[in-house]
Amino acid sequence: MTRLQQGAHEKLPAASPGDRVRVRAVLAAHDLEARRGRRVLFSHLSLSAAPGQLLRVLGANGSGKTTLLRMLVGLTLPAAGTVSWNGRPISADRDAFHRDLVYLGHAAALKDDLSARENLQSLMAIGGTACDAAQADGALAAAGLAGRERLPARVLSAGQRRRVALARLALAGQQRLWVLDEPFNALDAAAVGWLAGLLGTHLGAGGIVALTSHQPLPLDEGDAVVVAL
Amino acid sequence: MTAWAVFLRDLRLAQRRRADTLAAAIFFVIVASLFPLALGADPAWLRRLGPGVVWVAALLASMLSMPRLFADDAVDGTLEQMLLSPTPLPLIVLAKVGAHWLASGLLLSLAAPVLALQYGLDGPAIGMLVLTLLLGTPVLSLVGAIGAALTVGVRGAAVLLSLLVLPLVTPVLIFGAGAVEAVAGGMDSGGHFSLLGAILVAAAFLAPWAAAAALRISLD
Amino acid sequence: MTRINWFYYAAPARFYGLAGKLVPWCAAAAVVLGLWGLWIGLVVAPTDFQQRDSYRIIFIHVPASWMSMVLYVAMAFWSAIGLIFNARLAAMLAQAIAPTGALMTFLSLWTGALWGKPTWGTWWVWDARLTSELLLLFLYIGYMSLRAAIDDERRADRASAVLAIVGVVNVPIIYFSVQWWNTLHQGASVSVSKAPTMAAIMLQGMLVMALAMWAYAFAVVFARVRLIIREREQGAAWVRELRPAGALP
């Protein structure tokens, strides 16, 4: 893709299959239980993902896919079980975990009154990375929104809003864990290809991607971890 | 750096939605103007009522604008992103409350002299009124933030928020209105003033933690 | 030596049984102590020189005020335990305490009004204790309203826990500010709480009534928490095996 992306990924060491010495950046969950009201969605769920692995969550509507992702990032407290990052429970040092994390939920997290560029800069700032107007514009251009940076988010279509949200990934080289809830929703073919490229590059550089998706993924899933709810 | 960015963002949003910001201030003026209509316009009577009425009106107007603090962000998903920020959540809450106060409490404090004149208060009393509001409205925003965080996304959040927060902020009302009445009566207001200041410092340290805890619970 | 497992009764199922055994004992104690306290208050204690017999309402008013504050602190304590240890039972206890605490507060206000009428001719007096009790009632109502407004039980538990803890920190500040406000505004102090000089027998009467109310509170809270446990643990096997209570399916 662009110079920006390659530079941003330089810091991550590429994972090799027999790499036992550096077992870093491991996402693990142990004995998770989720309840909705008094109904148990799932219980005794354990999983782990190593650097370079894709974690894919499958399930029917309402089976708890979003709940599981939210537990992995710490937004939802599990009824039982723990989630750990780099061997430590995420509740131990939330700030450090958040530094390594990008989470894109169902909602695009855009303010209607801010422009696409302002929205992206604001989201990057909240996520802990400063980014100036030029970098933001570059990411938006990569996302196919060149020329629309100054439009208020209110006038963007659903697909365009999702592209603005996904533009964060183009700038998220530092964050090793990407957790995406149905990221391919509302995207056209070109955008799907672009996103697939981003994910592939991230995985290749040793990052971890956890996502849910109803459609077949346009990715070489390799040794993906599949969780079926 | 993140907190500063959130602060500026909220200010920018308030500035682009000026109508919402001004509505609370207009409510403040309307409520304070209703009391003479209900109670009679005897000047001496109004002069005694003035500090208390303006303070209660400020309290109600603040409660009216509190839900705005987290409601919009909760609906569009930005609040979740703040919960996942590497910056400690209490700091982000403090930044949001600061921006919110600039667009609400500060406006009320600056509008108060006009109302004070309607009630026939004299110079020193008006000065103390503005001063106590400047100290007290941040406390209202801080404690209100806890209420707003607890009621994010709940049915009837606005009224529930007032129900939860108003009993908790009665000390601010007592000391704030008390200081103005002391000055109006020619007495010393130092005690009330220092107590108000102490409450502000305590609230500035403790309320963001409570609000952050409440936010994590509400977005669970 | 066997170690005491403090968490043995932390499971709702076990606590259900324990509470069930304790309710009749607490109720009996409440009745016995209550009768004794009322006997002291109505029969033994001498008629007051100034207030005649109308002062006797303090034997209910003062213990009810004490209980309203003790129960609020207890509610906040169990809320905190429930929040820190993620313990459902502690949260259910806090939920069970709230209505009784509110009742005590209301009782305190009502008896205060009943005292005020014959003594000062008005049904309501803005004295420090009554005003503080009024604000405490609002805090209880706020707690119960927040619980009622949130549909998800666990979120309701945790949110109301935060509210209770914030409230308990605030109560001393509120009390202090109301005291301060009262001394400044009343001048000649009209105080519902200024009882006639406290003869030892009167203090004894109030303490006995306080213990009676405490026993009553235990009985009612345990009975209520059993209902709450049954309702919230509906899906569990042990609940389904219980005999239906009265007309409940």
Image (cartoon, coloured by chain):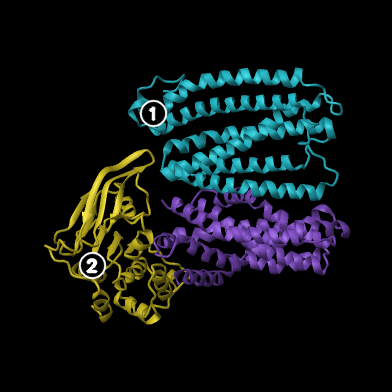
Chain colours: A yellow, B purple, C cyan
Q: Where in the figure is residue C228, as x and y percent of width and height?
A: 46, 31
Residue extending furthest left?
Answer: A18
Q: Secondary structure at mark 2?
A: helix
Q: Disc 1 marks which amino acid?
A: Ala
Q: Secondary structure at mark 1?
A: helix
Quick one: label 1, few (<14), some, or many (20+) residues within 10 Å?
some
Are tags 1 and 2 found on a single chain?
no
Q: Nearer the viewer, residue C83 or A3?
A: C83
Can the viewer see residue A192?
yes
User: Given this view, does label 1 or label 2 mark the residue nearer the observer?
Assistant: 1
Please say if B220 is above or below A24.
Answer: above
Residue designated by label 2: A199
Q: Amino acid at mark 2?
A: Leu
Q: Quadrant of residue B84?
A: bottom left
Residue occupied by mark 1: C13
Which residue shows up at 29% across the image and 73% down it?
A: A170
**Chain to which mark 1 belongs:** C
Q: Using residue A58 as the reference point, say whether residue A168 is left or right of it.
A: right
Q: Is residue B157 above or below residue C25?
A: below
Q: Is residue C151 visible?
A: no
Point out residue A102 in the picture as x, y percentages from the top left corner: 33, 64
The one of A53 and C70 positioned closer to us in this rendering:
C70
Estimate the x, y position of residue B60 in percent, counting from the top left.
66, 56
Q: Position of residue B114 (x, y in %)?
A: 76, 68
At horizontal 83% and vertical 32% (from top left) the residue drawn is C119
Q: How many marks?
A: 2
Mark 2 surroundings: few (<14), some (14-19) or many (≥20) residues within 10 A? many
| Mark 1 to mark 2 CA distance (whole Å) | 49 Å
Q: Quadrant of the N terminus of chain B?
A: bottom left
Look at the numbered discs 1 and 2 and tell me whether their residues touch, using CB distance below 8 Å. no
Compared with residue C23, is residue B35 higher up or lower down, i.e. above or below? below
For disc 2, the chain is: A
